[in-house]
Each structure stands twice: as structure tokens, then as C-alpha cells.
Amino acid sequence: MFNQFRTALLLGLLGGLFLLVGGLLGGQQGLIIALVFAIVMNFGAYWYSDKLVLKIYRARELEVKEYAHVHRLVNVLAKKANLPKPKLYLIPSHNPNAFATGRNQDHAAIGVTIGILNLLNDKELKGVLAHELSHIKNRDILIGSLAATIATTISFLASMAKWTAIFGGYRNRDNNIVGILAVAIITPIIAGIIQMAISRSREFLADETGAKIAGDWKGLASALKKLEKGSKHFPMRLGGEASAHMFIVHPFTGKSMMNLFSTHPSTDERVNRLSKIKL
């Protein structure tokens, strides 16, 4: 409940920043332009983000005859979660990882890498798959797309405001140009931090829901430790930081990142929270 409240609060803060920058750029007209721009981006993200991310990571549909035990696990877990079975995709990477995508529960997919299938035992893989099903059940894909779209729009508008101020677009107004530049530079940074905080909050919620679906928190906890270590040894060579938040662990953890700017909570914190879950 706390994670859901926190997500709503953070989305509200993103919306506030959106209005601030839109109004700063062009008053009421600026707000309308920003709103139209955001709606178009949200439409595209909702309908096509799953196809795009699967293509970026060169994923192909996972045949039942190849990994029958993975399909069996997903079948059992999907029934327990009261969800339609999502499509399964294989990502040709030794980075041990997984993600969920799709616009809703009826049109969802789970992508798993070759690395994760080779690394985890069935108990650990069950925990990971339950985690990904939780993202689908909790509609995190839509929330993540919404947050990313708003944050991207804020950055776009702030950039427009900055260059308009620099080239004299506000000279005939009473606005403080220094103040406009400061807001235009700082707001995208704040928006990015809020977006990352939303991602971390949803990861905690998916861990909790996933442990309850699997009926066991130890499998997921063990998997997270292995995945963190494995990602450091085999960082993802496909995709990029823009889609890193989708994975169960950060796929580029071979690079040092400050916790403040990480899309994922620390593994120690996740395991600690999992150990306190009452199943």
C-alpha cells in the first residue's frame, strides 16, 4: 500500500513539474502544446513500446520444445496470479536478466536471457518469473511508460525554454531570464530522479507480490544475489540506459552508478525487505 501511495505521489510531482515547465515556456498556450505532445508520446508508448524493446534486444519467441520447464513454471505461476499466460521471449545475451513488457495483462510478454536460464536453478527462476508476472499484474509497464513519457516531455520543454531564454525570446516579458534558465536546467534533473524513484518503488512492490505468488521469498532473494554478481561479470551489450529500468537487475551494473541515480534498489535492501514478508 505504501509503495502504491508513493508511486502516486511521485507521479503527481512529475505532473507538477510538467505544468511548471509548460507554463514557463508559453503560459496557457504552452501548457496546451505540452499536453498534446505528451498525449501523442503516451499513445505511442502504450501501443508500440513492447514491440520496440523486444526488437532492440533481438528477442525471439521462446519455443516450448526448447525450454519446456520454463513454460511449465509460467503456466503454474500465471494461474496462481490469475493472469493469462504471457508470451515468452529469448534474448541472445549472457547477461543474466529478465523483463516484462506489453500494454496490458492480455497483451504481455516476458523476456529472459540465455544467461539467466543457464545461471539459475528452478526455484530461483520461479522467483524471477513470479516477479515479472507481478509487474504485469500491478500494471507497472503502463506506469513506467507514463513516467518515462512525462520525464522526456519535461526535458524537451525545458530545453526549449532554455534556448528561448538564451536567444531573447523572453526579453519583452517581465520574467527573470536567470530564473528561467535555472528552472530549465534543474527541472529535467529532478524529473529524472523522480522517474528513477518510481522505478525503485515498483521493484519493491514486484518483489513482494512475486514472493507471494511463488509462495517463497528465498528463491527470489537467492536469484537477485546471483543476478547482481552475474551482471557485473557479463554486462548487457544490447540496448541502452533508456530501457535499463525494465530489467529485474540493472543490466549495465558493470558501470559504477550512484544509488541516487539508479533505477533499481540495492540488492541488499531488496533481500532484507523480502526476508520480512509474511507469506
Image: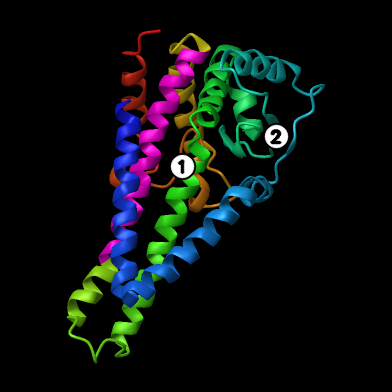
Q: Residues within 10 Å of mark 2 (few under 14, many from 20)?
A: many
**Residue at the (29%, 28%) spot, across then down:** 2
Numbered range of the magenta stretch: 186-213
**Foreground of the two, 46 or 156:** 46
In the rendered image, the vertical position of residue 138 relative to residue 101, given as above or below: above
From the top left corner, tell me how far across and down residue 271 is, in percent.
36, 21
**Foreground of the two, 158 or 12:** 12
Q: Are marks 1 and 2 in contact (CB under 8 Å)?
A: no
Amino acid at dot 1: Ile
Left or right of residue 249: residue 166: left
Secondary structure beneath dot 2 equals: strand
In the rendered image, the vertical position of residue 241 relative to residue 64, given as above or below: below
Quadrant (top left/top right/bottom left/bottom right) for the C terminus? top left
| Tag 2 residue | 89
Quadrant (top left/top right/bottom left/bottom right) for the N terminus? top left
Task: Kindly give the residue lying farthest to the right in the view shown.
Answer: 65
| Tag 1 residue | 143
Amino acid at dot 2: Tyr
**Residue at the (60%, 36%) spot, across then down:** 104
Q: CA distance from mark 1 to mark 2?
A: 22 Å
Q: Residues within 10 Å of mark 1 (few under 14, many from 20)?
A: some
**Residue at the (28%, 64%) spot, across then down:** 20
Q: Earlier in the sequence, mark 1 or mark 2?
A: 2
Q: Where on the picture, by quarter, is residue 189?
A: bottom left
In the rendered image, is residue 188 in sight?
A: no
Residue 193 in magenta stretch = yes
